[in-house]
Amino acid sequence: MPHQFDISTIVNLRDLGGIALAGNSAVRPGLLLRSGQLDRIDPMTDPAVAALGIHTVVDLRTEHERRERPDRVPDGARLIVADVLAGAVPAAVQGDQVPARIESVLGSPALAEEHLGGGKAEKLLCDSYRAFVSSQPACDAYRLLLSALAEPDCGPLLFHCTAGKDRTGWAATVILLLLGADEATAEREYLDVNPAVRAAFAPVIERFTSAGGDPRIADAILGVRPAYLAAALEEMDRTYGDVETYVRDGLGVPDDAVDRIRARYVA
């Protein structure tokens, strides 16, 4: 089973270690970490963070997100920027902007109702997840992540976005499927972040609903749902047929790199 850490300065921090894989194996613990943004950590005063031994951080966020809340990278760790939504055109509310602008899209109940009400939020998130598979910036970003995992000196790696649920959720799904997890296991890990994300964004939800916002919209934007992940998986299957082909042909990660990833992270 994956381990969720009780480290208050890192949102939604989880170790993929222990997740069951094919052949009675599991993900090796302590090497594959996922989380939300790292803007609050203080490695000098937080021994729990230092104890993780993080060597590589992969930031999946946009330039705007990085500028607003820069990562505080643990001492000795290298930072790799892998912007899944690079080049997305800013707008009041667009599908490709929702994962990056959670707080702003919930800033106005009236605008949220106009742009996200009546099931529009769910459709926008599903469109966004399909773009995780099909857009060139997303393919470039996830290639950077997997290429880092294949490097000999990678060490314990942490990958993250803002909430650690959408861009990070797809990354975790791809990694788990590539290592040999079945789809049900990958989906379970994807959905298990819901309580941590809701807790982290409780103040945002409270402000939105107190101002008259529809809690169903907040739930659709801040939650993870089977339909969202299914949209990405369907896009992957439709375009590539399976995860190996997606990683090789879509992301451009060669088979020998995949072999190194499997050798390192499968216990």
Image (cartoon, grey):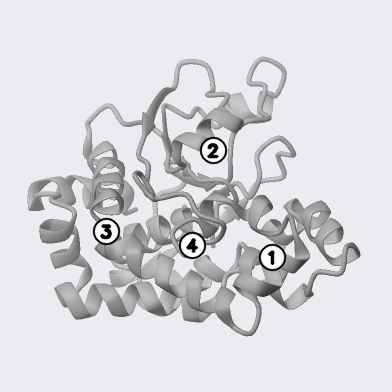
Left or right: residue 163 versus residue 180 is right
Q: Secondary structure at mark 3?
A: loop
Kindly give the residue lying farthest to the bottom in the view shown: 118
Q: CA distance from mark 1 to mark 2?
A: 21 Å
* Label 1 crowd (10 A; few <14 / some 14-19 / many >=20): some
User: Percent x, y for residue 53?
Assistant: 50, 27
Q: Amino acid at mark 3?
A: Ser
Going from N to C along the chain, the mark reached first, 1 or 2, is: 2
Q: Amino acid at mark 4?
A: Gln
User: Percent x, y for residue 33?
Assistant: 48, 45
Left or right: residue 147 versus residue 45 is left
* Label 3 crowd (10 A; few <14 / some 14-19 / many >=20): some
Q: Secondary structure at mark 1?
A: helix
Q: Secondary structure at mark 2?
A: helix
Residue 17 vs residue 123, the one in the foreground:
123
Going from N to C along the chain, the mark reached first, 3 or 4, is: 4
Q: Amino acid at mark 2?
A: Glu
Residue drawn at x 35%, y 44% is: 86
Q: Secondary structure at mark 4?
A: loop
Q: CA distance from mark 2 to mark 4?
A: 16 Å
Residue drawn at x 41%, y 79% is: 230
* Label 2 crowd (10 A; few <14 / some 14-19 / many >=20): some
* Mark carried by residue 94: 4
Going from N to C along the chain, the mark reached first, 2 or 4, is: 2
Q: Amino acid at mark 1?
A: Leu
What residue does disc 3 label? 135
Q: CA distance from mark 3 to mark 4?
A: 15 Å
Going from N to C along the chain, the mark reached first, 1 or 3, is: 1
On-image quarter of the N terminus: bottom right
Q: CA distance from mark 1 to mark 3?
A: 27 Å
User: Percent x, y for residue 25?
Assistant: 34, 63
What residue does disc 2 label? 65
